[in-house]
Image (cartoon, coloured by chain):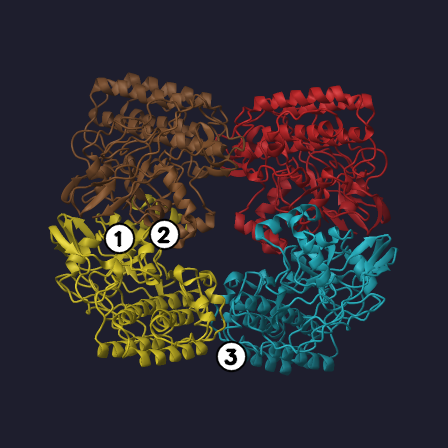
Chain colours: A brown, B red, C cyan, D yellow
Amino acid sequence: MTVYRQAEKQSNLGAHFSAVRALSEALVQPLSDADATAQSMDDASPAKWHLAHITWFFETFVLRDHVPGYEPYDPAYSYLFNSYYEAEGERHARPHRGLLTRPSLAQIFAYRRHVDGAMAAALTDLPAEARELVTLGLHHEQQHQELLLTDILHLFAQNPLEPAIWDAPSALPAPVPGPVQWIEGREGIIEIGHDGDDFAFDCEGPRHSTILTPHALAHRTVTNGEWMEFMAAGGYSDPRHWLSDGWAWVQREGIVAPLYWRKDKQGWTRFGHDGRRPVNPAAPVAHVSLYEADAYASWAGARLPTEPEWESAAQDLDSHGGNQLDSARCPRPRACEQASGLAQMFGDVWEWTGSAYRPYPGFRAAEGAVGEYNGKFMSGQFVLKGGSCATPRGHMRASYRNFFYPHQRWQFTGVRLAKDL
Amino acid sequence: MTVYRQAEKQSNLGAHFSAVRALSEALVQPLSDADATAQSMDDASPAKWHLAHITWFFETFVLRDHVPGYEPYDPAYSYLFNSYYEAEGERHARPHRGLLTRPSLAQIFAYRRHVDGAMAAALTDLPAEARELVTLGLHHEQQHQELLLTDILHLFAQNPLEPAIWDAPSALPAPVPGPVQWIEGREGIIEIGHDGDDFAFDCEGPRHSTILTPHALAHRTVTNGEWMEFMAAGGYSDPRHWLSDGWAWVQREGIVAPLYWRKDKQGWTRFGHDGRRPVNPAAPVAHVSLYEADAYASWAGARLPTEPEWESAAQDLDSHGGNQLDSARCPRPRACEQASGLAQMFGDVWEWTGSAYRPYPGFRAAEGAVGEYNGKFMSGQFVLKGGSCATPRGHMRASYRNFFYPHQRWQFTGVRLAKDL
Amino acid sequence: MTVYRQAEKQSNLGAHFSAVRALSEALVQPLSDADATAQSMDDASPAKWHLAHITWFFETFVLRDHVPGYEPYDPAYSYLFNSYYEAEGERHARPHRGLLTRPSLAQIFAYRRHVDGAMAAALTDLPAEARELVTLGLHHEQQHQELLLTDILHLFAQNPLEPAIWDAPSALPAPVPGPVQWIEGREGIIEIGHDGDDFAFDCEGPRHSTILTPHALAHRTVTNGEWMEFMAAGGYSDPRHWLSDGWAWVQREGIVAPLYWRKDKQGWTRFGHDGRRPVNPAAPVAHVSLYEADAYASWAGARLPTEPEWESAAQDLDSHGGNQLDSARCPRPRACEQASGLAQMFGDVWEWTGSAYRPYPGFRAAEGAVGEYNGKFMSGQFVLKGGSCATPRGHMRASYRNFFYPHQRWQFTGVRLAKDL
Amino acid sequence: MTVYRQAEKQSNLGAHFSAVRALSEALVQPLSDADATAQSMDDASPAKWHLAHITWFFETFVLRDHVPGYEPYDPAYSYLFNSYYEAEGERHARPHRGLLTRPSLAQIFAYRRHVDGAMAAALTDLPAEARELVTLGLHHEQQHQELLLTDILHLFAQNPLEPAIWDAPSALPAPVPGPVQWIEGREGIIEIGHDGDDFAFDCEGPRHSTILTPHALAHRTVTNGEWMEFMAAGGYSDPRHWLSDGWAWVQREGIVAPLYWRKDKQGWTRFGHDGRRPVNPAAPVAHVSLYEADAYASWAGARLPTEPEWESAAQDLDSHGGNQLDSARCPRPRACEQASGLAQMFGDVWEWTGSAYRPYPGFRAAEGAVGEYNGKFMSGQFVLKGGSCATPRGHMRASYRNFFYPHQRWQFTGVRLAKDL
């Protein structure tokens, strides 16, 4: 099995299972049944659906496949809560997930109770292969925790009342960071990709050599203040900075600012889990598409990092640090660190790279349904690295490959500049 | 003021107000917050939205405009719950009503309490003009009661679980009605349209003369059994029966049966407020579009009645009779009456006429926002008459003009045949 | 056969045939093969297609069906040049007519030569039924002559070069007509619809009685100058004047003026068969939709005439008069006649009525394929009366019922006001 | 200037110019004015537009910018015939190119005469920078020659008459090639990308090192016969083989075979420049998308080559060999060569690689309008290598990077398999 290399030790696995499952439920505490049911766009899913889907994953690939005698909680749930696993048969059309007012949020909690109980009973005796699937399922659930946060943010942003999901303590204004410092990267043959016994998704390997040309990375991500300079300079209306598809997108969609930004009388504001607030010039810009990131870099006389450049630099850093999700409280950007070296590599915002999401040399998808996990998405998308303020701490590593289409921006996506030397 | 002729007496008005308002709330008792929030298509609205909108109507046109010192319950509600009154300013885009997870259903009930209290306090002292608006608002609310029932049916039909909203006592199978009898209609100059002091919508008048040519109406509506004959005869695949727009619709949408019908192993079933059940051949066909109704009539060698033909025949009948909505229980077709004369003219299903919804001679819309009530919809739609099993008893009369686009069929819409003599 | 009442006399028929066929070919003289091939929107057809389709009509319904031994010129043409006759089998999809670069215009002329020859040989011996079809075919061809002119105008309007199809002698500026005079119409029972032995389309009958209420018609149509007043008064941006569907159309399409109008530095210009020229305030407004016509009437405190009102008034007038198409030269509006009575009833512009296009009492479509000619279009469209400057003279009569969807405006469509008395 | 490295010698340049320009005109000899005007989809352009656009390129970037006193032939042409150069101002919307019936094909030929004359007069005295632009323009024209051939093929395929553009001599049936031989590729550090003095597009450089892992390439491309095995094995209906976007595309578009294939009574046929003919099992499959190519490779237990793998292998071969376009005659696949080594690398069909079209390390677009030539298209597209039967001989080289979106297949696109060793 190639999906990942090693299952966690038994004791850790139980604790890990409990902790991850608990965080998912904590995240939805502020939500009503209706909040958890609505779907604001095809790309998003209802919170209730996330909660059920990640439970269905354990029920199907662990309990059904590896626990003799397990009976599915409700045979209809497989149809309702399969996401995209073709091997698992027909499923409810994604754009209609928001019409599933039944089962209710309370019923989904009951479903979770049931599966959690069966998992607790089964964990001690699971074969190694199944334990690997449990670990996979937990990382899968962490991915959906981030999606749940960004999807619910998108939903609330559609409501003219603009409700805040969490109150945020009024943060002290962060000091505006100083100018970008350029940190020279490695040159020549390097290795990237996952190797070793820790968990990783299949697409992160095999580890392999690649060649870096002389380059430098910005020591920090682009700030909202810098982004407003780009806007003031006409960045959104000058086709010279834009990829052709990006320029068509800007014009078709009437894009003039990052997602959730709006110009009010007092100036630019943004919507977040804490409601609508003034844009903080010191914070990293978030909710920009690859098209916008690339145009900004072009305007700034720079470019986006490649995935190998980014990963090479990140291999030396602590992937558990930075502004990531520690609890169910709404994640929000903290002040930029004023480090002289590379900062914000992990946490804050996902960083668009200029690398297309394609397989590494020798990549092979896992057998069976879980093999649909990554490989089939390898066209048309770009790699993002580093995690965001909504990524559960512990989920991230340098080899992690997130991927989105170049127009998507409802995730916490931002920009780090790079340049050739 | 031309909207209607006379306000109800004061004593009646208070009782009427309470009864209508109570029915609306009874209808949503089976619904969860999520059920009441979701919107299954652009044509439909969430139940919660209906409850709020009909309350906003009273708050705006009665309390705000006629009760000095009344303060709006929540200034944002006008934006959220205005339906289409351009004169009342900007409003939330209709297709996004299903994303309003806040305010919650409970909050909307609180809003209703507030407005009901203010209305109760104000009713005794309202000027005549305002009392007329109260009556208008009650008829408006009754219209939304029917829409609420058909919208929630449409929503539940999208759920693969196909939940029943109400349990239905298993009705005795109705006897299949005998062949159609043709009832000769009046000929020559007749009068149609509303006149007199009772309430009517503006579009029902002025009363005026028109000329009927020799014709007859079927004594009952078309049954499901007859419709299945049409289907078996290839009715949905023979363009000769269809209006050109209807044929394009059938092909584009892949229409092969009435809405909510599905062929299971045991035969045709339909979805209703009582869940999915076998199609009852004795019951009137429902959920067919004007296109289907017209094609059926063409196949049967007949035609649809015109509005004057229908109204002329109905003027002699009791509009309070028939299978209409008496309570919050799910309405369902009863067995066809075996009358020798005209049956089912009121209740059961709305009957498509062959008449376009256009103004009567001398029609003028009311002044102000409530003048947007009817006149502006007079293009592209057809008139339906007689009410349905989901129409609140007491709301109907012979001059009533309902209207829908020819492809719409999520209402309880059926067919009565007519022919030239 | 109910399509029309009487075939023309034999001698007349031959001359009529030659004259109509010649006009079609004269109209396309200015067109290149490419001009005659392109299709600028789904509603329009290429000029070459028109020429072939009207020839296919004779070939199919006369030669094939009534001339023993006739062999089709090219068996593929039935597929290519059938418009919408379902009974005649599969056909080329309408939106792709503009991709038929072969057969060439020259080949279509050859096709016409062939069919014209066969028709000339056959005309003397045709049975009465076939002679009726010839007459029908000639009126059908006249309809397509007008469509050909409006479709080619639409095509040329898409070309940034805005080529003129015909040079127009610079007309003397017409005097701006004086204010509207209101001409009182008949009241009470009148008769409309076709009767007698002359040709008429099936939908024009049966002749029947209807009732008119007191009303008056404007003695002339609305001028461009008056329309500019409507525009200056904000007519296109005030929803109160508009039908609901019309207002949605205005906003969705960004409509601010009649079709082909553009504001240049010197003021409003319009595109016509003679190229782009300043809008003539004295000329009748043309290229407005039913939505616009209705909004204008509402703004002007008037309404559109009903079809019976219009037809009743027109029955006394000479349908061969007015500004109609006499030759292949580009038709263009002439100065409005300063008559004290009703003017411009025939010719100039088609006049939108407020009447939906629905069947008259007792209407039955003809049997067979030609029965698809009119009846199946009787939903969603409005009646227009009187013909236009592009209608071949001799084609028009008071009972003539043209019909278009309320948003369409690439025909020469204008407005006459009416009001209740 | 980084677009390419060296201008051709003066004597060569004149001859090259004449030869390339002549071939363009020869290719359109079979086309009528209408054939050359129609546009069958947004991705394609009319032949007439190609002829004008490639002429506009010389007129604008050479004559206007480098020949003092040159007056544009027609000032409107810049608007009409600019393709996508934002720096050159507004231009006619691409989807409406097919409505430009004027200027005629004859007028475009006259335009070409005029520009060719001015170019001939200017060539001897052009500065080096302008001579580089001439060379660029000639390679640009060669690209459009291939597009012209594929666009006109697409147009003719929409015509139910399926006209042949060229008669093809009936070729002897090619022997079906034997099984694939796997040719081992280089391993370790290699160099790819253009270097040296010959012409190349900007995106082909800089030359740089990359690392190849052990792999082999199929010695020939996939044949139609092999493709029919894939189809017979249910390849188009099994989601496991497909990229997720590809599977959505297959289902949405109803794809069941390569473009232009149709199953007739006698079996599968394909449409080509020589009309509709039986599919030749020995010929390379053409007109497949990246999605199809990837699914085929997956089904066959292989993968697509990466660009570096392909280019490394091709660097040793003669890029002037193979089945390429030598004249204006319709190109058609020849029998596969039975070489024991790599065959068909150049010519026959473009070979999809698994590499996204992204910039090489150190890539910088050229300054000015010609800098829009390549870089701005670097998102969402895949690289194709090797040229096709429709690529003008002499235009191709190993470093050449063609690019299309993964769903596009109206080019002569095929498949070569690769595998890891």
The residue that mark 2 highlights is: A241
Q: Give the label on residue C106, or none.
A: 3
Q: Name the amino acid type tagged 2.
A: His
Pointer 3 chain: C
Does D22 sit above or below residue A333?
below
Mark 2 — on which chain does it sit?
Answer: A
Q: Amino acid at mark 3?
A: Ala
Q: Position of residue B167 (x, y in %)?
A: 58, 23
Front residue of this view, candidates B181 and A94: A94
Q: Which mark is residue D359?
A: 1
Q: Are marks 3 and 2 on the same chain?
A: no
Chain assignment, label 1: D
Locate the N terminus of chain B and report the quarter of the image it occupies.
top right
Q: Nearer the viewer, residue A372 or C364?
A: A372
- In the image: residue A243, left or right of residue D4: right
Kindly tell me whether residue B167 is visible in this rendering. Answer: no
Quarter assignment of residue C255:
bottom right
> Which amino acid type is shown beneath numbered disc 1?
Pro
Indicate the quadrant where residue A25 lies.
top left
* Relative to C242, residue D63 above or below: below
